[in-house]
Each structure stands twice: as C-alpha cells, then as structure tokens.
Image (spheres, rainbow, N blue to C red):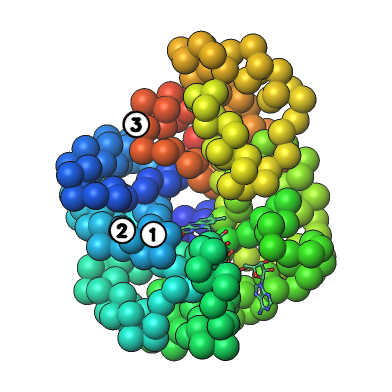
Amino acid sequence: MKLTEILNSERLSLSFEVFPPKTDTAFDSVKHATEEIAKLSPSFMSVTYGAGGGTSKYTLDIAKNIKANYGVPTLAHLTCVSSTKETVHQKIAEIKEAGIVNVMALRGDLTPELENSDRSLWAYRHAVDLVRELKENADFCIGGACYPEIHPESTNQKEDIKYLKEKVDAGCSFLTTQMFFDNNLLYNFLYKIREAGITVPIIPGIMPITNGNQVERAVKLSGSFMPQRFKSLVDKFGNTPAAMKQAGIAYATDQIIDLFANGITNVHVYSMNKPDVAEAIQNNLSDILGQ
Ligand code: FAD
C-alpha cells in the first residue's frame, strides 16, 4: 500500500521507525525487536539505511519480513551520496523485487572522507537527485526528510526551504521531520513551508528520550533545541533509568497529543528498536488513535 493512502486520511495514526542491524550476529535480535513493534499494528513502519550503505542488505530483509508476515505497510530508506548510478539502479531493482512501494529518498550524512573529496565526481549530490532517479525508474511513493530547525549544513531557513520545495517538486509525496522537542518549532516551520507552496503531508518525527545518555548524542546529531522543561526532566531523572524511561515516554506522549490536537494526523516515532517504548506510547494514546 502506498503511504499516501494513509497520510491523506483524516484518521489519527502512529507509525514507527526501526533500524537494521550493523552486523550479521545482531540480525536475529533486531529482527525480533522489529517483529514485536510490527505486532502493535502501526499505520506503517520505516526501516533506515545504514550510513554509507553499510547495512543496506538488511534494510530490505527487515522491511520485507514486516510487510509479508505482519501486514504492516513499510517504507524503505535509501541514501545516495556515496553511491554510483549502478549501485542505485541495483537497489531500485531489489526494492521493486521485494514488493516495496514506499521509499524514503535521502542524501545521507557526509563523512569526513566525502567532505574532502571532489564533489564534481559524485553521481548524486543531494537527495533531490535521488528523487529524480527514483521517479524515472519506478512508480514508488517517495518521501523526503525535512528539518524544522534547519539542516545543519544550511546557512539559513529560507535557503533550506527553497531546496526542500525543489525536492518536493521533483516527486516527494510526503516529508518526515527531524526530531524536535518543542512543538512550536514545528508549527512555525509548517507555516513557512505552506507559505512557500509545499502542500504535501508532513509527518512529525518524535524521539522518545528514555535514557539520560541518549540526550547528548541525539542533540549532537540533530542540532535540536532542548526546552527548559525537557532539560529539567533530564537533570532530575537522567541518572535513574526507570524514572527517565517513564518521564521520556510521558514527554513524547505529551508532544504527540499536542500535535494531534493541532491538526497533525500521523506521527512517526523513532522507536530505536525498543518494542516496550513503542507499546507504552501507543497504549498512552489508545483512545485517541483512530479518531
Ligand atoms: P538533502 O535534501 O540533499 O539536504 C542536505 C543539505 O543540502 C541541506 O542543507 C539542503 O538545504 C541542501 N541542499 C539540498 N538540495 C540542494 C541543492 N540542489 N543545492 C544546494 N544545496 C542543496 N541518514 C542515513 O544515512 N540513513 C537513513 O535511513 C536516514 N534516515 C533519515 C530519516 C529522516 C526523517 C531524517 C530527517 C534524516 C535521515 N537521515 C538518514 C539523515 C540524513 O541522511 C542527513 O540528515 C543528511 O545530512 C541530509 O539528508 P537529506 O536527504 O535531508 O539531504
């Protein structure tokens, strides 16, 4: 099923992101975790693509399993920045063969090696190049990433939104956001992108922070602003794992309820392959979802 069917519906729904294993030995435990999340029957699940394509084989293995054995619509991520045209064509063929119709088209992060290489030799410089390639070669429902607090490489939001519009015009049917911890940032962003003529569904991405050690890494990777309310919670409970988990789930739930109350219909939760966290959030919303 193409995700646009879900995203264009008025019903409130929740989806989860999982990531594939980095090694063969971790495959079974990751597969099991993703199956436990699939049993919650989310509206869809996305499976990330390892930076630089490292775990690319497993992205499709996990996505195929979730779709075939649990009937959950899947979204396979694909990155392009370190790939040749041949590799991307091969990946497109594999995705088609797996029967997956939803693809998240990403550039991928720049490694220091890539940063210092000759960009004129790259087959794909930006996600928009991959979107065009996907459009030319298949009938996928294509998603793209967006950044309510601007992409860390962008000099300003106006420029970031200009390129985002280009990506949507090239063929993205929806956009999923980077994590954020203050919903007002999302509402401001929505206002600006709608004003710029971007009308596709936006799926806010919510990261439940359930472990004090996660905070620094999450903020470093995303550049997200930490509201004082969230900082206080981490200061108070960050060193007590069970309390931090409970508080992190409550904070994420609160963010999601506010998003639904303000007109968002699908929220994507970065589950970090934790079925208990995914289930707790879903249970907290049991009478809200499906409205
Ligand atoms: P782009 O859309 O190419 O944007 C990157 C930068 O280039 C931005 O600053 C943008 O303004 C600028 N830009 C865009 N087009 C142009 C242009 N034509 N000319 C000049 N500048 C331009 N990474 C993974 O490795 N695997 C994953 O599975 C994965 N999943 C993700 C899912 C989500 C929801 C998000 C938000 C991120 C994900 N990432 C993933 C991280 C992503 O790869 C990085 O954030 C990366 O740095 C940018 O990817 P992008 O697709 O947004 O790039």
Residue 141 to residue 39: above or below:
below
Q: Which is in the foreground here, disc 3 or disc 1? A: 1
Q: Residues within 10 Å of mark 3 (few under 14, many from 20)?
A: many
Q: Is residue 105 above or below residue 118?
A: above
Kind of residue indicated by mark 2? Thr
**Quadrant placement of the N terminus:** bottom left
Compared to residue 39, the image places residue 238 above or below, namely: above
Marks 3 & 1, CB-CB < 8 Å contact: no
Ligand 1 image position (quadrant): bottom right
Q: Nearer the viewer, residue 24 or 58?
A: 24
Residue at 71%, 18% (x, y): give it.
232
Name the quadrant containing residue 74: bottom left
Above or below residue 173? Residue 181 is above
Residue 132 seen in the current view: no
Q: Check residue 275 in the rendering and tell me which mark sits there, or answer none.
A: 3
Pointer 2 residue: 55
Q: Give the percent coordinates (x, y) of residue 70.
A: 23, 46
The kind of secondary structure element at disc 1 is loop
Disc 2 to disc 3, C-alpha distance = 21 Å
Foreground residue, 273 or 176?
273
Question: Does any atom of ligand 1 lie closer than 8 Å to the CB of label 1?
Answer: yes
Judged left or right of residue 71, residue 255 is right
- Closer to the camera in the image, 120 or 201: 120
